[in-house]
Image: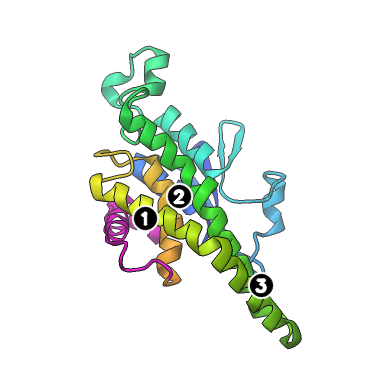
Amino acid sequence: MSKLHLHHLEKSRSFRILWLLEELELPYQLTKYERHHGLAPKSLQKIHPMGKAPILQDNGKTLIESANIIEYLIDNYDQPSDQQDAQPISQLVLNKKFRPDYGSEAYEQYRYWLHFTESSLMPLLIIRLVFATMIKKSPIGIKQVAKLLKSGIDKSYLNHSLTEQLKMLDKHLGNNEWLAGNQFSGADIQLEFAINAMQETHSLEAKYANIHNWLKKCQARPAYQKAVDKC
């Protein structure tokens, strides 16, 4: 049995880690969890107190947070065979298949976009989801108030912020094949989940053609398809 053990929650960020494990062609144990009333099951708290997915276990370590796990897997398992005798520091920062060399301009792009997803884009999408859920579940007498509140937030903050972020991303992908330039990387894996969620909810406008094309390329990768089959 593999020492890598991924605890994967359906329709969640943990798909990112499943996908990366397939890209790395690593053996791993997969335990899948279903949502209870839309939430993660309490059984995940027995593995980590946060009770959120993804959770990756490796040699006694228990790791959470997508970006942290992506970096961990690239640091420790993304190593070309011809670099096995390299110095430890070189193994960490150079010749990675899924991350540009440390110190390069591509690496700076990688690092920015890796953190852009959860720091900038996802909070906006979560706000939108919270308001949509609030309207759906509100009693009839409160529903109109909830709609007005959502409309105010959309007009004063959410729509503008989201548009500016998507315009920036679309422009970047118009000039680059992948987020880190010519190299597919962990940053693309991190971002795909959020962009795919927008596409599935019909909130990614057609005018962002470069983003749509990038998403298609991500989802056409064989490792992506293998990860989908395992969900």
Q: Which of these two is toward me, 46 or 180?
A: 180
Q: Residues within 10 Å of mark 3 (few under 14, many from 20)?
A: few
Identify the residue under disc 2.
16
Q: Which stretch appears magenta?
A: 203-231
Question: Is 75 on the left-hand or right-hand side of 42?
Answer: left
Q: Residue at x 36, y 22 (%)?
A: 103
Q: Residue at x 38, y 20 (%)?
A: 91
Regarding residue 108, the answer to whether it shows in the image is: yes
Q: Residues within 10 Å of mark 1 (few under 14, many from 20)?
A: some
x, y (%) of residue 1?
49, 40
- Toward the top, the furthest residue is 87
Question: Is 22 on the left-hand or right-hand side of 157?
Answer: left
Question: Is 31 on the left-hand or right-hand side of 100?
Answer: right
Disc 2, SS: helix
CB contact under 8 Å: marks 1 and 3: no
CB contact under 8 Å: marks 1 and 2: no
Q: How many marks?
A: 3
Q: Earlier in the sequence, mark 1 or mark 2?
A: 2
Regarding residue 10, the answer to whether it shows in the image is: no
x, y (%) of residue 143?
69, 82
Identify the residue under disc 1.
167
Q: Is residue 150 magenta?
A: no
- Quadrant of the image occupied by residue 36: bottom right
Q: Nearer the viewer, mark 3 or mark 2?
A: 3
Kindly identify which numbered label has been placed on residue 149.
3
Q: Give the amino acid type for the residue marked by disc 3 in the picture.
A: Leu
Query: How far apart are the two marked residues, 1 and 2, measured between alpha carbons?
Result: 24 Å
